[in-house]
Amino acid sequence: MAKSSKRNPMPRSVRAARNTMWLEAALALVTGGLIVLLHHTAKEFVPPAAEHDVYRGAAGLGALAVFLLLSTLLMRFQWRILWILNLLVQAGALVGLGWLLFTGGLYWALCIGLAIVPITILGTLTERFARRWFNH
């Protein structure tokens, strides 16, 4: 059974990470929807790396959003495996953005702007109080 939140409240850094994960989930849903919409209406706006994989990319972004939403809801249980999965997903997001940057799929400034959210989540989840809270 998980510890009661009254005995072990969620630290500010974990709450900040949770709120940023809500933002990342919304960004993933909006981006996936825009990729499909632009594929049908204005093909020149779809990045070259996503031209042939539009639906796969949208499905991947949708899966990311669902994982992030479930993860934020389950965060109060302080599961160590969830903490590790969150860190791995954010590292994977940064690797994916790096791949898009170096293959010419996205403009460099957009990649840097999109990387701010996973970097924020990684920083807040690896902060000392967050590590202690998840590794109770």
Image (cartoon, rainbow, N blue to C red):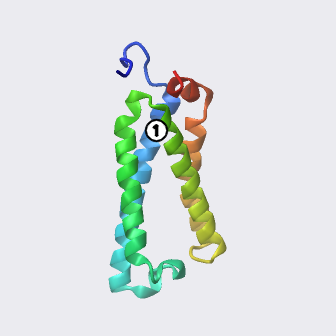
Location of residue 20 in the rendering, given as x and y in whole percent from the top left corner: 46, 44
Determine the secondary structure under disc 1.
Answer: helix
- Residue 63's x, y, as percent? 38, 58
Instruction: Identify the residue at horizontal 54%, vertical 59% (top origin).
Output: 114
Residue 68: x and y, percent?
Answer: 40, 48
Relative depth, front residue between 21 and 71: 71
Residue located at (59% from left, 70% from top): 100
Residue at the far right: name it.
Answer: 102
The residue shown at (44%, 78%) is: 53
Name the residue located 36 percent from the left edge and 36 percent from the top edge: 74
In the figure, residue 7 lies in which quadrant?
top left
User: Based on the displayed image, in which of its 4 quarters is residue 93 positioned?
Assistant: bottom right
Against 9, residue 110 (above or below) is below
Residue 136 image position (x, y, % from top left): 51, 21
The residue singled out by tag 1 in the image is 82
* Residue type beneath disc 1: Leu
User: From where the camera sits, is residue 42 visible?
Assistant: yes
66 left or right, relative to 18: left
Q: How many labels does the image show?
A: 1
Q: Which of 109 and 125 is in front in this view?
A: 125
Q: Is residue 35 visible?
A: no
| Quarter placement of the N terminus | top left
Callout 1: 10 Å neighbours few (<14), some, many (20+)? some
- Horizontal arrangement in the rendering, residue 47 relative to residue 7 (left or right): right
Examine the rendered structure and indicate whether residue 96 appears above or below residue 119. below
